[in-house]
Amino acid sequence: MESSPTPQQDLHTSQTRHAQTLTRRSRLALAVAASLLGTIGFTACSPTSDSATPSTSVNAASHVQQVAPGAPGKAPTWAFSGKTGIGTSYETYTQGQYQDAKHNPISRVWFSLAQGILTETMYGLIHNAQLKELQFVITGNGFVDTEKDNTISSIEYLDTNANGRPQSLAYKIINKDVEGKYQIEKHIFTDPDRDTLMMRVTFTAFEDGITPHLYVNPHIDNAGANDIGRIDTHANNHTDNHANTHTGNQALVAYTAAKDSSVMTVKSDLNFVQATTGFVGVSDGLADLADNGRLDTPYQTTSAQDKSTVGNIAFTASYPTLIKAKPVTFNLAIGFGKDETQSLANADASLAAGYDAVLSAYKGDATHIGWHDYLSSLPAIANMANNTTDSGKLLYTSAMVLKAQEDKTYAGALIASLSNPWGDTVSAAVPSTGYKAVWPRDFYQCAMAFLAMGDTQTPKVAFEYLKKVQVTEKTPGFTGTPGWFLQKTHVDGQIEWVGVQLDQTAMPIMLGWKLWQAGVLSHDEISHWYQEMLKGAADFLISGGEVNLDWNHTQITPPKTQQERWEEQAGYSPSTTAAVIAGLVAASDIAKEAKDPDSSSRYLAAAKGLSDSLEKHLVTTQGLLKNSTGVSTPYYLRLSPNGEPNTSDTLAANNGKQGLDQRQILDGGFLELVRYGVRGATDKLINQSLQLIDNTELEHNLRIKYEFSAKDGSTIPGFRRYGNDGYGEDTVSGNNYAESGSNSADQRGRVWPFFTGERGHFELALAQAKGELTGNNAQQTKQQLINTYVQGMETFANAGMMLPEQAWDGVGDTTRYHYQLGQGTNSATPLAWTHAEYIKLVRSMTDGQVWDNYPIVPAALK
């Protein structure tokens, strides 16, 4: 169980909670009226004498109308992206794949939590969201509250060991009304035997007149503009899929008009007093509640039998009014399926199995393999926990977070994040994956983290999956030179983005070499994959070639890349070149093993040539920046568009920022040269460049380093991607990234916590190079590194121990979300890369050497 969050760990209770309680109700009335309801007054809602008795049928006194008006409703968006938890059931491989079997059914449901409520919940493929949010609306004497906006939220893990380390991705959320009128406790996890999410809810009223109402906003099949909703009030009358007929007792059923639509069914074992469905912002039940706290104009469906009316729909369902100080507990199940029968059956079966049985299976028990089993299968993790500053809590969480971000239809498909960046202002009118997709770069980081913990199965399956996203002659629509890896794809390999990034072509080779060296891939296996996948990648790293795919028609001439690791600029990049050199050296070693000596020699010669010309293309001797002592020395550029670092070549404009002289822009990408072994940690140019990175006197647009307070009160460093970064919130308006539909010149990219890990890796390599990890002071040196960099990354974790993509740096307007210094923003949380970097850093500190270093590289480059 995590202790109470520090200001750096939690994001303003629930972002917009309005904790000034004296004016909270009046402000809420105005906000609800403006955004959802129009001008509507509030009147008291009095409980009935038998208000806590479960009802067995819809309130017959209400006037039930058939079809809700107001299509298509308010334009749909996704939910807040700063997740405090994610979850899914742990499943085991069968011969390297996820295969449904009677004794081991595969549950393909994932969920996320933010602002104290259930947010995007996926079914089928990992990117296929079916739900935007599920929360409670609370009515009482003179008010209508929404759980998200009017409670103070805390989150912890249901299942921890004696050291407080989470043992499964099962959560307990407690949301307390800011005026002390009620409390909501929710336990959330999935059913490993079915496609169902399970939630146990305990409501407690501390005054009379409190009535809870369930509010559900579906986004079926990854979009929110095409949905149909229906209230089902009768049981045992199953008919054709999606037909406007009853198929269950008090079920909320959502689907689209598409023939192959997924179906979502919400059921409760405490019956609703009344339920309605309608269009968001018009007829979804919130307006109905606002006048008297009751649903007295309910609608049965949002579309007639022809299914011609679709839109952004929501359900609102009322529970019995509560008796003061008498808690009421009930279970909710959200069942998913390929048709209505399957969806309803899943929800019913999970409710019938019961809370205790489903939670026990989720954890792992005598008859079920669960999260306990996965954690116990990681041989390195217990010892690694000794090199953390939180007793291993974030380490154990990170292990499960990474495993949870793998698809269960396409085994080994590791996504970047189970979130849509800045989702609450991103349109959900048409399907989009957000970060729920495959990038080989992020993928590599995750695979190496699994290997660091001693999980050899997942990175092997992941490595073999990579063939699906490599460009070949069979890639639809492609002509040109094959061998490179696609920029971004769906987990099924569907092409999404088509830029050529040479580091993403090098990293599969690097991963293959690591797996071979670890004994995960045998001689025969690495030889097979060399011919099948890695040789083509290595050849492309040397020669490049013509690329024609979708919009992309270009000629690639390595080491100049069409896009560097931030996917924004063409040119010569230190981080990209580091990966290309390491990849070619690894390819040379693998080629030798595969009995291809000519290619081995060619790859090695190319790597040496790139190393010899590195400084020529990437280091300026006529720089425009000075270090903190006012001295100008040669330094690595973020990027040189033409490989001529002493010229005034301008970087391309992007993310709202005008392009600047290449010599003004820094980033820490050159540290990858040390990590992979291309340059030593004591290299003069590396350390001169670091002095500029560390110069906190640079003006904010160009400045990289910021400082934060760690858990123990010490100062820890954080770093932005690069100077002039616009991938973040607007400093003037406080708007999310590109919220208005276009980029603003005032947008600002924030601190990315995984850079604290990257710096920690460098400082470990430097200490090792200086001999400081041996001798009398070795333990003191190591502990100081742990306290600074491991603790530093732990500091950026939120209350649910999720690590963000970006953290607030204190620059700009924070009125909207009340971000505090060091807290994760609304960009993307959890970011798999950040959790992977943390795991690798802890392993590196445990070993006393950099985990993903390539010792063959410096030897080969001599």
Image (tube, helix red, strand yellow):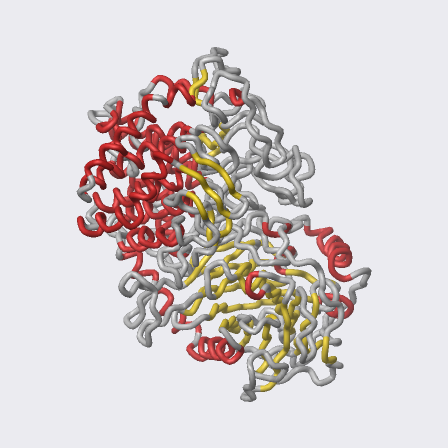
Q: Quadrant of residue 588?
A: top left
The residue depicted at 72 percent of the width and 74 percent of the height is 295
Q: Quadrant of residue 193?
A: bottom left
The answer to whether residue 754 is above or below residue 612 is: below
Relative image position of residue 29 (x, y in whole percent): 75, 57
Question: Does the image show residue 254?
Answer: yes
Picture quarter with the C terminus: top left
Nearer to me, 627 or 26: 627
Picture quarter with the N terminus: bottom left
Question: Does the image show residue 212?
Answer: no
The residue depicted at 59 percent of the width and 55 percent of the height is 79
Relative image position of residue 15 (x, y in whole percent): 61, 49
Relative image position of residue 67 (x, y in whole percent): 72, 77
The residue depicted at 51 percent of the width and 33 percent of the height is 569
Nearer to me, 855 or 394: 855
The answer to whether residue 262 is above or below residue 771 is: below
Nearer to me, 800 or 112: 112
Nearer to me, 590 or 249: 590
Q: Quadrant of residue 161?
A: bottom left
